[in-house]
Amino acid sequence: MTGPDALAQDRRGGEMVAGANFGGRRWSWKNLSALVRLVKLGISYPQLRSTLFFIDRNADVVIAPGAKVTIGRELRIMRDVTIRVGGELVLGDRVFFNRGCNLNVLRRVVIGSDSLIGEMVSIHDDDHAIGAEFDGTPMGERPMIVSDVVIGSNVWIGSHCTIVRGVHIGDGAVIGANSVVTRDVEPRTVVAGAPARLLRRI
């Protein structure tokens, strides 16, 4: 891992460490704690490819053997975020996950640079198989169906949204809070609802 100057400052600030200055940025105690968490993560998962990034307390990241994770500059993962990667995860520069997000990757998820993921957002590239052929089979024993999720650059996903498998969200799109996105979203549009529908173009 390289680039100490890529570690994002906590928005709320904090007590500064006297004399600590890396790449022109002073680090708070909270960011130093985040660095320790990041180092532990890198030791646990050597397949992780990234610069330094901010990971808050109680964030839980699990990367399965054989999974691939590529992270751009200045990723921020706030507290209580859960990330599970069994396939391929690609995150661009300055991606932000707010508190309580859940990201599950069995196949492939891509999130472009400068995208903001609001509180309690759920993004899954998988779901359980349904249909008459599975009648009588407990839901937990059915096979998983997977398809890529691609979220473009400069996308804003409001709080408590659900992004289901196979969805592609175009650059500059805005997803209103509490939406369930079940189909592709065009670039530079605002959508909302369950299921999410076009409100306007921007």
Image: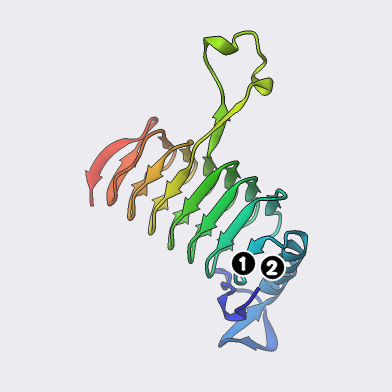
Q: Position of residue 72 (x, y in %)?
A: 52, 66
In this picture, residue 130 sits left or right of residue 40? left
Residue drawn where x is 36% and y is 35% of the image: 196
Q: Which residue is mark 2?
A: 34
Q: Which residue is mark 1?
A: 54
Q: CA separation, marks 1 and 2?
A: 6 Å
Image marks 1 and 2: residues in contact by CB distance under 8 Å: yes
Q: Nearer the viewer, residue 191 or 125?
A: 125
**Residue 126 makes an appearance in the image:** yes
Residue drawn where x is 58% and y is 80% of the image: 5
Q: Position of residue 101 (x, y in %)?
A: 57, 47
The local crowd at label 2, few if under 14, some if 14 to 19, many if 20 or more residues have their Cα within 10 Å, is: many
Residue drawn where x is 57% and y is 86% of the image: 23
Colour mapping used in the image: rainbow
Image quadrant of residue 184? top left
Q: Residue furthest left?
A: 201
SS at badge 1:
strand
Look at label 1 and name its amino acid.
Phe
